[in-house]
Image: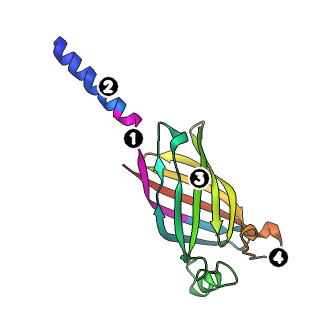
Amino acid sequence: MNKFGSSLVTFLLLINALSLVGQVQKIVVAEVHFEFVSKGVKGTLSGFSSSSEFHPTQMENSIFKGQVESKTLDTNNGLRNWSLRSRKYFNVDEYPYISFHSTEVNMETNVILVKGMLTIKEVTKPVLITFNRNGKELNGSFDINSMDYGIKIKKNRADNLVKVRLKLELHE
């Protein structure tokens, strides 16, 4: 390869590397799974919308902000869905969305830590979501106690543990 060809290849590689630095990805698709641990009840939420920005090379500039429609709560049991959507639990008519917005995003040993505020019904509380990146996917998880959000499934506080799993698709 002559000097010109070598310089051109170097220049193209540099341009490609610089383009990755400012690359911002959006989160436009999400799967939200939950489990009420004490009852072994699993389900999903859908109706996802987001204005998130993921900055893979500048994680601290990332913003995670999105919501799901509470009326989409699905446990694969119509009667249970109706009950959970009712005024006694999620009250989906009065509180149509469950939302989250990040307050801090960091990378620690190949794990993305997202601190933020989760709102269910009229209660907003801090949560920490731990994500692993797998190509164009972010897989995350966190635990909450439903009683903290005014949703009392069982009398004993420890029996109201809910495990939440997220699968987010990244798009440029």
What numbered label is drawn on residue 155? Answer: 4
Q: CA distance from mark 2 to mark 4?
A: 61 Å
Q: CA distance from mark 4 to mark 3?
A: 31 Å
Residue at which label 1 appears: 23
> Residue 101 falls in which quadrant of the image?
bottom right
Mark 1 belongs to which amino acid? Gln
Q: CA distance from mark 3 to mark 1?
A: 20 Å
Q: CA distance from mark 4 to mark 1?
A: 48 Å
- Label 1 crowd bin: few (<14), some (14–19), many (20+), radius 10 Å: some
| Image coordinates for residue 39, horizontal then vertical, percent | 71, 74
Residue appearing at x 78%, y 69% in the figure: 159
Residue lying furthest right: 156
Asked if residue 4 shows in the view, the reply is yes
Mark 4 belongs to which amino acid? Lys
Which badge, 2 or 4, is on the more N-terminal residue?
A: 2
Residue at which label 3 appears: 102
Q: Quadrant of the N terminus?
A: top left
Mark 2 belongs to which amino acid? Leu
Which badge, 2 or 1, is on the more N-terminal residue?
A: 2
